Structures are given as structure tokens and as C-alpha cells.
Image (cartoon, rainbow, N blue to C red):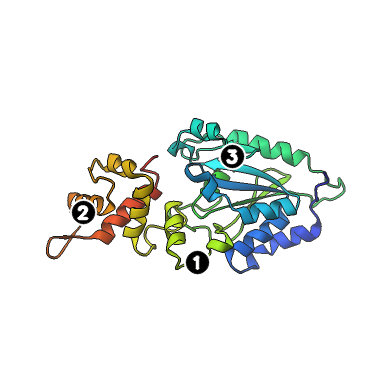
Amino acid sequence: MKLRHTSPQRIKKLENIKKQRGKYPLLAERIVKMSDIILEILDSRFITETRNPEIETQIKKENKKIIYVCNKTDLIDIKKINKEGIVPSPKVFVSCKNRKGIKELRNKIKIIANKIETPVEDSFDKIIVGVVGYPNSGKSSVINLLIGKKTAGTAAEAGFTKGIQKIKLTKRINLLDSPGIIPHKEYSGSKKEAISKHTKLSARSYSQVKNPEMVVSDLMKEFPSVFEDFYKIQAKGNSEILIEKLGRQKGFLKKGDQVDEDRTARLIIKDWQFGKIKI
């Protein structure tokens, strides 16, 4: 299989990429076109849900190489993932928090890059590795560990990376960090199902989501005992009971001795998104 090589024209496009604007899904499509290898960063807790079928279809169509990077493995039992066989190959399991799997990922990138033929006489020759994934999937953290220093901006806030960053991995390999990408079909600010899913995946920040009580309700339906065990509160799988008891426990009260449900629900979502609550 013949792989496309880097050209001076593509380098020029890379230099001007920060000037490109548009919805993030469209930006991701451009990144795929400009890259030789794509790292799709997935949340190990929700691998199927954080895969982007639209981007993967384009990667296959463009005849590019892909590596599935399962991040946040410190929040789940890896053996369970391997047993279920839900991650295609090539794949690498990574924990940025525990600094695990990065060496394996770096080596895998180099092995694939070395198989990409490029003209010797091309002094501008570079292998481009695009990094894509849902907002707050840990793309920038993976990049920082890959290069061994903090270059890509990181934050707990979903969607922190606002533009494209080109970062040098080796003399021959450049990384492209992108904003968090949500599939076109989910690109909505109003659909309740999408809002709940994106908040669960940390793609929408706890501080920005509307109706956080609804999100907590959906989370508890999926993981009832997880939240009760973490907060040591018996709620019988009922999110309203959990919010009521936790709110009083934390002193989140409004006038009339009423629990501030919004504030309490946002605390639960924050603990979830910051990885305090494991499944």
C-alpha cells in the first residue's frame, strides 16, 4: 500500500492552519487530510462512545494510518477492556496520570512513520501525526508526555484547546493537536440526549451544562452503585435522593432550608469529570 508523502505545499498549509476557521468537525477533516498518521484518543471507560465513526471513515477513505490510544486507564480495569475485545488494532493503553503506556505509543508511532516512504531530496520532509478525539479526552496530556515536556496546553475544562498546535516530536515527525471534536450528528447545543452523553464523556464542562440534575439522573441510571459507594450515601438508585442527601451533607442550602440542587448536581458531575469517581 502506497502512502502519501509530505510536500512543500502541505508544509505551507501547516504553517497557515491557525488561520483556518470553522466548526471543529470540519477542522478535524482537514487535519486528517494533512496527516500521515492519526492518533484517535479514546476514554478507556467509554471506548465505543468516544470513537468518532465519521473521522474513522475519512481516515480509511484517505488511506491513512490510525492508532487507537485508550487514555485514562487508571479509571478502569484494563483486563476487562481486553477481554471484551472492543478496541481495534493497532492500539495502546495509556494513563497520563500514572505516566504509563507513553513509551509504547512513541515507539509505535516511530515504527509506522519509518514505513512511510518520502523523497530523500525533499528537505522539507516531515511525517505529520494528527491527534483527534472528543473534548477533554486527554489529547494535550498525551502529547505533552510524548514529547517529554509541557508544550500543548491542558486544562480540566472541556474544550480547552482552542486552535491548532504544531509540535515537534522528532526531527522527522510533527504532531498536530486539535480542538476536541464532536461528530456532526451530535453537534447540537440543545438535544438532551447529546448534552447528557457529552457531559458524561467530559466533552461538556460541569460548569457549562444546562440542567445538571438531568445529567446526574442519567449517570445514576447507568452506574447506580458507583455514586452511592463514592459518597457513602444510600439513595436506592434515585438521583433526587442522592442530590438531596449530599447537598445537606455539604451544606449547599438555599433560603427555606432547601438544598441547592443545581450546585450539588454540578459537584457530582465535577467529581466525575475530574476522575475522582471510578467505575
| Residue 183 in sight | yes
Contact, CB < 8 Å: mark 1 with mark 3?
no
Amino acid carrying label 2: it is Glu
Q: Is residue 270 left or right of residue 43?
A: left
Q: Which quadrant does the C terminus fall into? A: top left
Q: Is residue 204 left or right of residue 56?
A: left
Residue at x-position 63% and y-position 64%: 26
The numbered dot on residue 188 is 1
Q: Secondary structure at mark 2?
A: helix
* Relative to 213, residue 274 above or below: above
Pointer 2 or 1: first along the chain: 1
Residue beneath disc 2: 244
Q: Secondary structure at mark 1?
A: loop
Contact, CB < 8 Å: mark 2 with mark 1?
no
Pointer 1 or 3: first along the chain: 3
| Residue 150 in sight | no
Residue beneath disc 3: 87
